[in-house]
Image: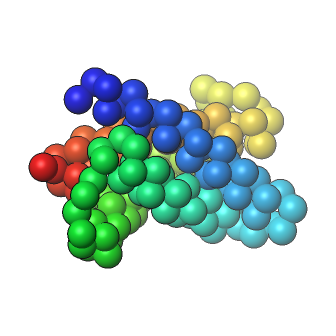
Amino acid sequence: MIEQFIKFGLVGGSGVFVDFGITWLLKERIKLHRYVANSAGFLCAASSNYFLNRWWTFMSKNPRIEQEYAIFLLISIAGLLINTLILHFFYEKRGAAIMPADSKKRFYISKLIATAVVTIWNFFLNYFITFAK
């Protein structure tokens, strides 16, 4: 399990680049609302993470890829809800009191905290449900 968690973390690291990159592009360049941009970034990262985790982390041989992917996405969507709630809490509610006054910095620090929490959520649910052997 420890080796898989490390691999899951490495895959998640690549997902962070996908997530933050797409979030930044949509929020800063295309000017979508921050929560729409966050959702799109998170879901794109979840999709790339599924395929990398299936192949490398869990070495799944499940022939029912659609079902496995759907379960992974459901867990990720629940993770997205947790991510958004944490982001909202730190950015909108508590962030000004405990984080930098700079709105952009506070947003991305909040997103980093949310990402860390959801990584743990995603690993354990995927370990015990999606890729359970």
Q: Nearer the viewer, residue 118 or 104?
A: 118
Question: Whole-percent x and y of residue 54?
Answer: 36, 53
The answer to whether residue 119 of the structure is visible from this angle is yes
Seen in the image, is 77 located left or right of residue 89? Answer: left
Question: Whole-percent x and y of residue 98?
Answer: 60, 26
Seen in the image, is 21 located left or right of residue 4? Answer: right
Question: Whole-percent x and y of residue 69?
Answer: 34, 67
Q: At 56% from the left edge and 47% from the top edge, which residue is drawn?
A: 15
Quick one: which residue is furthest to the right in this view?
Answer: 29
Kindly indicate the quadrant of the structure image that contains residue 45. Answer: bottom right
Question: Whole-percent x and y of residue 91?
Answer: 61, 44
Q: At 23% from the left edge and 44% from the top edge, which residue is drawn?
A: 127
| Image position of 61 with respect to 113: above or below | below
Q: At 82% from the left edge and 67% from the top edge, which residue is drawn?
A: 31
| Quarter of the rendering occupied by the N terminus | top left
| Image position of 55 with respect to 109: above or below | below
Kindly indicate the quadrant of the structure image that contains residue 26. Answer: bottom right
Seen in the image, is 30 located left or right of residue 4? Answer: right
Q: At 83% from the left edge and 68% from the top edge, which residue is drawn?
A: 30
For the image shown, how many numbered marks are present on the structure?
Answer: 0
